[in-house]
Amino acid sequence: MSTMKNNFDLTSLLRPHILKLAPYSSARDEYTGSEGIFLDANENPIGSVTDQNYNRYPDPYQSAIKSIIGPMKGVTNDRIFLGNGSDEPIDLLIRATCQPGKDRVLIMPPTYGMYEVSASIHDVSVDKAPLTADFQMNLEAVFSEIQTETKIVWVCTPNNPTGNSISTQAIEGLLNRFSGLVVVDEAYIDFSTEESWISRLDEFPNLVVLQTFSKAWGLAGLRVGMCYASTELITILNKIKPPYNISLPAQKALLSGLSTMERKEAMVLEILKEREELRKMLEKLSFVLEVFPSDANFLLVRFEDAKAVMTYLLENTIIVRDRSKVYLCEGCLRISVGTAEENVALLKALESFS
Ligand SMILES: *Cc1c(COP(=O)(O)O)cnc(C)c1O
């Protein structure tokens, strides 16, 4: 059972003008039927210049998609927000709560770069409570960094670029005692055995969960991210988003993808098998110092000379991510798990490196 000691109140957390805002009323808000003569949105009535027709605006609230993912995730549609990638809810959450030049957010480096970039775009200060040496949350450091102006704390689990999951007790401790939003980014949850925080939304009104179609689902090019939160917060996000933020082709492709869900499960299993194979082989290399445990679809690997390995791989047109200058990741490269063939090519290249 949780021991709530926070004073969370969404109304006082939101920027006052956002609370008062009247949203743009799109033509499609007024009539929701699908049959009729539509002369309300200044669309081209004849068709499109392309083979496929895209002349009609898409559903602004993506109800067909939410009707499938709601039951799948065990939430009602009014607790789901879909964005143009996870980048969009990240931006909108800051926009909704943080007064530029005044309010603050907190991150736990090393972590995903967009939290800081997005805050900086809004002139919102970013405080840092670094992870411990074993890449876990330092709750004491987090609470010593939290100020009255801190509106959001970002938690990435499994974390990018370290690959590990963040302790459940630490996140509970944060949710119980922090009066702002705790955003748990679960971009890699499908590769992990941990349960999603979505199941605990009822328990914590300050909890926001991000997921994405970009990784396990294999739809990075479509740009669709998910945000799960209280109905009240989802209402606000819907109010401030660009009206048609998910394009018609993206909605169509996603709908068809959701009807072949076994494919996602099969791909995840294959990637997990490849991840363990890759780990075993990397650990055998004399110039590999450490392969960190991963609950994601990548491995963080510490090398004797990361820069030399990176350069050598690039010469062989194998591109990995250099994290060697990142705090706690000194000497590390982040390697996404490829196909069996790609991993063999990577290992072959590394074996001839000396
Ligand atoms: C890849 C990734 C995302 C996904 O971003 P999209 O905008 O949905 O493609 C989100 N968070 C983290 C930590 C990631 O690594």
Image (spheres, rainbow, N blue to C red):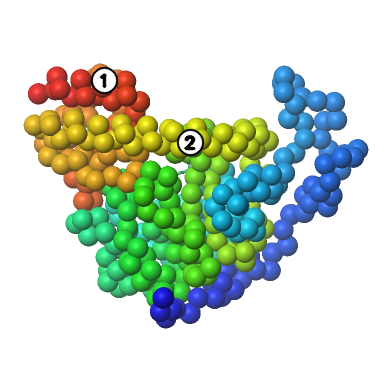
Q: Within the displayed image, which quadrant is ligand 1 positioned in?
A: top left
Q: Amino acid at mark 2?
A: Lys
Horizontal arrangement in the rendering, residue 233 relative to residue 180 (left or right): right
Q: Which residue shows up at 50% across the image and 32% down it?
A: 263
Q: Amino acid at mark 1?
A: Ala
Disc 1 designates what residue? 345
Q: Secondary structure at mark 2?
A: helix
On the question of residue 321 being in view, the answer is no
Q: Nearer the viewer, residue 149 or 245?
A: 245
Q: Nearer the viewer, residue 244 or 197?
A: 197
Is there a contact, CB below 8 Å, between mark 2 and mark 1? no
Q: Nearer the viewer, residue 49 or 15?
A: 49
Q: Residues within 10 Å of mark 2 (few under 14, many from 20)?
A: some
The mark closer to the camera, 2 or 1, is 2
Horizontal arrangement in the rendering, residue 312 relative to residue 77 (left or right): left
Q: Is residue 155 above or below residue 172?
A: above
Q: Quadrant of the N terminus?
A: bottom left
Q: Earlier in the sequence, mark 2 or mark 1?
A: 2
Query: In which quarter of the view is residue 238 placed?
Result: bottom right
Q: Residues within 10 Å of mark 1 (few under 14, many from 20)?
A: some
Q: Secondary structure at mark 1?
A: helix
Horizontal arrangement in the rendering, residue 335 relative to residue 238 (left or right): left
Q: Position of residue 207 (x, y in %)?
A: 48, 65
Q: Quadrant of the C terminus?
A: top left
Q: Which residue shows up at 64% across the image and 55% down it?
A: 77
Disc 2 designates what residue? 264
